[in-house]
Image (cartoon, rainbow, N blue to C red):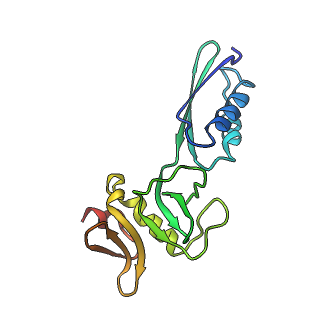
């Protein structure tokens, strides 16, 4: 029941080869009867673009690993740099960026793997609550005095959300 074939689906981007290699190496030390999820998670811990893993075995010697990746919801705009960020605030430095994502202005690029609490994190929470298909229609999210969180639609009006409470309900309204 030793693993001799590892199939990996879903890894993409600049780190895809390293992600596949790390998972393959970890999985080959397992059996199809005893998959160690903690070891697989540890293998991909250096890659913030990996959101989770789904693993199944095919008796007697095969393991299939589906890599579920973080999708960016916004670009942190630090002047000369645009840094993608996921819905949970994870910074996705190695993920290719799409100019169709909304921007969130920041005065200083974030340090570390996760966006700290503050205005930018609130703006990410607003975009995380939005229907994903709507994101390309939003140009920017900022905090506006007297209105709170504000989403600026491309070629359209500004939408005022106030604070971060009931964001999903506000989007539906």
- Residue 95 place in picture, x, y as percent: 56, 49
The answer to whether 37 is drawn above or below residue 143 in the figure is above
The answer to whether 16 is drawn above or below residue 147 in the figure is above
- Asked if residue 91 lies left or right of residue 154, the reply is right
- Residue 66 place in picture, x, y as percent: 54, 32
User: Which residue is most to the right?
Assistant: 29
User: Which residue is most to the front?
Assistant: 80
Of residues 107 and 79, which is closer to you in this image? 79
- Residue 152 place in picture, x, y as percent: 33, 71
* Residue drawn at 32 percent across, 57 percent down: 134
* Residue drawn at 54 percent across, 72 percent down: 79
- Residue 39 place in picture, x, y as percent: 71, 36
* Residue drawn at 52 percent across, 66 percent down: 76
Position of the N terminus by quadrant: top right
- Asked if residue 95 lies left or right of residue 132, the reply is right
* Residue 6 falls in image quadrant: top right
* Residue 5 falls in image quadrant: top right
Total marks placed: 0
Of residues 23 and 32, which is closer to you in this image? 23
Position of the C terminus by quadrant: bottom left
* Residue 111 falls in image quadrant: bottom right
Could you tell me if residue 100 is visible in this image?
yes
User: Which residue is most to the bottom?
Assistant: 146
The answer to whether 120 is drawn above or below residue 133 in the figure is below
* Residue drawn at 41 percent across, 66 percent down: 126
Could you tell me if residue 164 is visible in this image?
no
């Amino acid at each position: 029941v030793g693993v001799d074939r590892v199939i990996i689906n879903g890894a993409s981007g600049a780190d895809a080869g390293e992600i596949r290699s790390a998972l393959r190496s970890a999985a080959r030390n397992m059996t199809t009867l005893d998959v160690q999820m903690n070891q697989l998670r540890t293998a991909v811990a250096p890659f913030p673009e990996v959101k989770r893993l789904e693993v199944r075995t095919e008796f007697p010697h095969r393991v299939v690993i589906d890599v579920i990746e973080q999708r960016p919801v916004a670009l942190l705009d630090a002047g000369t740099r645009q840094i993608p960020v996921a819905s949970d605030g994870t910074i996705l430095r190695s993920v290719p960026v799409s100019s169709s994502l909304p921007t969130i202005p920041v005065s200083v690029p974030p340090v570390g793997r996760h966006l700290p609490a503050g205005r930018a994190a609130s703006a990410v929470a607003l975009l995380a609550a939005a229907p994903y298909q709507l994101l390309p229609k939003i140009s920017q999210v900022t905090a506006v005095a007297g209105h709170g969180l504000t989403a600026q639609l491309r070629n359209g009006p500004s939408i005022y959300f106030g604070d971060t409470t009931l964001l999903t309900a506000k989007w539906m309204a």
